[in-house]
């Protein structure tokens, strides 16, 4: 299968949050089964010069092992991607998401954490180093939540604790997006978009929805 037609405004208008989510998960299934689309990038570049109509915005970690378009089998013009270590929201990312959905018409916000996240491990261990310290503060609410839910060591030596913190960080980020962005919350309440979360498994390549 060769993808050589970019999303148009007409196509975007027919999409629903649920259909977009299904599409991204189908793409992940193609990726894990070795059946990713062949891309005619020249055609896609040419068609998107005048505008873009992505179906979703994904908030992901910067981790080099989680190339978002690749693991979801998406192409030029398909999705917006915001990346920061630990996949948490901040003012700039919230503004980017509001642009994606309210201005550019995307139907889905996907917060995508990943297995064995280094930023989450560092937050679990209380790492302090330059600007990394302030960055990790965004993940500490998830660390504290996990400490109440998981027995044993509350640091990165406890794999179960790290895994729970990765999940909690995704869920809390989703909660804060709704809390800090009245625009996105209203759009979700009206059914125009959906805010969802998942965890990418480094060991299998699968996205597991929360």
Image: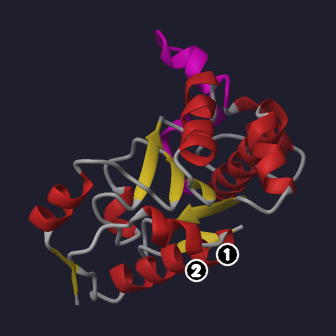
Residue visible at 80% across and 42% down? 178
Q: How is the image coloured?
A: secondary structure
Relative to 139, does residue 115 appear above or below in the rendering? below
Relative to 1, does residue 89 appear above or below in the rendering? above
Residue visible at 53% across and 52% down? 57
**Looking at the rendered structure, which numbered label has been put on residue 22?**
2
Q: Are marks 2 and 1 in contact (CB under 8 Å)?
A: yes
Which residue is situated farthest in the right direction here?
148
Relative to 152, does residue 15 appear above or below in the rendering? below
Quadrant of the image containing the C terminus: bottom right
Percent of width and height locating residue 140: 72, 30
Closer to us: 33 or 154: 33
Whether the magenta-drawn stretch holds residue 76 is answered as no
Q: Which residue lies under the disc numbered 1? A: 18
Relative to 1, does residue 4 appear above or below in the rendering? above
Would residue 56 be found to the left or right of residue 143 on screen? left
Write the start and end of the magenta stretch as one range.
113-138
Whether the magenta-drawn stretch holds residue 131 is answered as yes
Residue visible at 82% across and 35% down? 182
Secondary structure state at the residue bearing disc 1: helix
């Amino acid at each position: 299968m060769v993808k050589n037609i970019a999303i148009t405004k007409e196509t975007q208008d027919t999409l629903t949050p649920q259909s977009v989510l299904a599409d991204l998960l189908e793409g992940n299934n193609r990726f894990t089964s070795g059946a990713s689309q062949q891309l005619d990038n020249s055609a896609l570049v040419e068609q998107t010069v005048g505008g873009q109509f992505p179906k979703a915005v994904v908030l992901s970690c910067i981790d080099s092992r989680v190339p978002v378009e690749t693991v979801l089998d998406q192409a030029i013009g398909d999705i917006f991607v915001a990346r920061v270590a630990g996949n948490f929201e901040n003012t700039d990312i919230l503004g980017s998401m509001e642009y994606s959905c309210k201005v550019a018409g995307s139907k889905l916000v996907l917060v995508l954490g990943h297995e064995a996240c280094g930023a989450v491990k560092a937050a679990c261990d209380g790492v302090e180093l330059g600007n990394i310290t302030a960055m990790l503060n965004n993940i500490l609410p998830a660390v504290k939540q996990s400490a109440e839910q998981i027995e044993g060591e509350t640091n990165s030596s406890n794999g179960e604790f790290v895994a729970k913190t990765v999940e909690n960080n995704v869920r809390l980020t989703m909660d804060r997006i709704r809390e800090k962005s009245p625009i996105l919350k209203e759009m979700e309440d009206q059914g125009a978009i959906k805010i969802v979360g998942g965890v990418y498994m480094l060991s299998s390549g699968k996205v597991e929805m929360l």
